[in-house]
Image: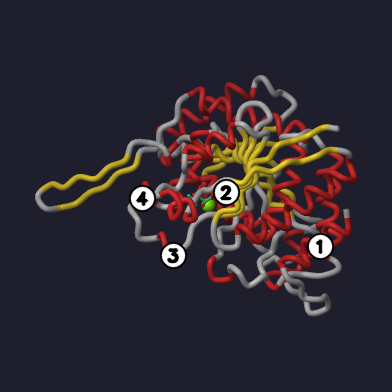
Amino acid sequence: MKKYSIAVIKGDGIGPEIVDETIKVLDAAGKKFGFETEYKGCLMGGCAIDATGVPLPQETIDICKASDSVLLGAVGGEKWDTLPGHLRPEAGLLGIRAALGLFANLRPAKIFEPLVDASPIKREIIGDGLDIMVVRELTGGIYFGQRGRSEENGVKSAYDTEKYSVPEIERIVRVGFDLALKRSKRLCSVDKANVLESSRLWRETVLRISKEYPEVELSHMYVDNCAMQLVRNPAQFDVIVTSNIFGDILSDEASMISGSIGMLASASLATGSFGLYEPIHGSAPDIAGKGIANPLATILSAAMMLRYSFGENDAAVAVEAAVDRALREGRTPDIADLALPKLSTVEMGDLVVKNI
Ligand code: IPM
Ligand code: MG
């Protein structure tokens, strides 16, 4: 039987609760589709700071590298908010992206039919549904560029640098084109080429790579216009490819269209089939331990793992379909529907398992 090893980082806040439900779903999918999954837990974020003094222990990187993929819950919380930047839980997240070479972040903003009325966007704008894939560059740009502070004549300054090399742009743009080929063959590259030099290099590179993909219809959009268009007419988008910072912002915006940030999955991919999978919502410390967190974004991230890291497409489709059916039978409070039973985190996980 095929066997996949998964490094599991439950993290902080609601992380452990939502990851536990996801493991149940992965096990159920394995049973049905004939593969085995084995898990190895490791620490990152606040819990790692408490246990080891750093947000990303070397042991965690080693365990992840020795696995076929990584499942991550969420990191962060008030307790660690006052630590200096390099010791905050978020530094663990940025560190692991860099350490594992996870340069391509896929964030699907997809609306499940039963949730159309939960979206803040009107039904007539959403139309038959919505299925946008944001491809965000994840290991470059302003997140990893030079930064610093200075002081002159008593006036303090700080700076961060947006810098992209051609190879960095090429590899993420190819991910965008390859995905577009498998979907509706439309790609929108988002930049700020009317102002930023790094964006002008981005656009030149996109144009050059586009010659390798004559079947894909390419468009370019400035990021401010894209932010507006996502709300005005989201159905015009299929695959969006963009830089680290623009992708961070636009993917949060796109996620909201889908009804709840509690529904949005993500995959962070390295070259080859290795990837880290996590929900895009955070650790939600305000509801941690109450058993009410929505595990579906993590479960949908596991479906992406099945698809992108293991090539278990049938299992991935089955998990996504099980989520769709479960949404018609019950809901966690964040997506509550008066006509349906209100479920706990564990009950929601059980319902997905039942529907596989
Ligand atoms: C995300 C988050 C992170 C980011 C933070 C927590 C560092 O917002 O994954 O989108 O900005 O990349
Ligand atoms: Mg973000």
The image's mark for residue 261 is none
The image's mark for residue 226 is 2
Q: Residue at x 63, y 53 (%)?
A: 279
User: Is 75 situated left or right of 262 in this image?
Assistant: left
- Secondary structure beneath label 1: helix
Q: Amino acid at mark 3?
A: Glu
**Residue picked out by circle 3:** 78
Q: Residue at x 41, y 52 (%)?
A: 88
Of pointers 3 and 4, the one earlier in the residue sequence:
3
- Secondary structure beneath label 4: helix
Of pointers 1 and 3, the one earlier in the residue sequence:
3
- Secondary structure beneath label 2: helix
Where is residue 29 shown, x and y percent of the image? 84, 47
Q: Amino acid at mark 1?
A: Asp
Can residue 288 be seen in the rendering of this structure?
A: yes
Disc 2 versus disc 1: nearer the observer: 1
Determine if the C-beta at disc 3 is less than 8 A from ligand 1. no
Where is residue 191 shown, x and y percent of the image? 51, 39
The answer to whether residue 95 is above or below residue 18 is above
The Cα–Cα distance between marks 1 and 3, rounded to whole angstroms, is: 31 Å
Determine if the C-beta at disc 2 is less than 8 A from ligand 2. no
The Cα–Cα distance between marks 2 and 4, rounded to whole angstroms, is: 30 Å
Disc 4 versus disc 1: nearer the observer: 1
**Residue picked out by circle 4:** 85
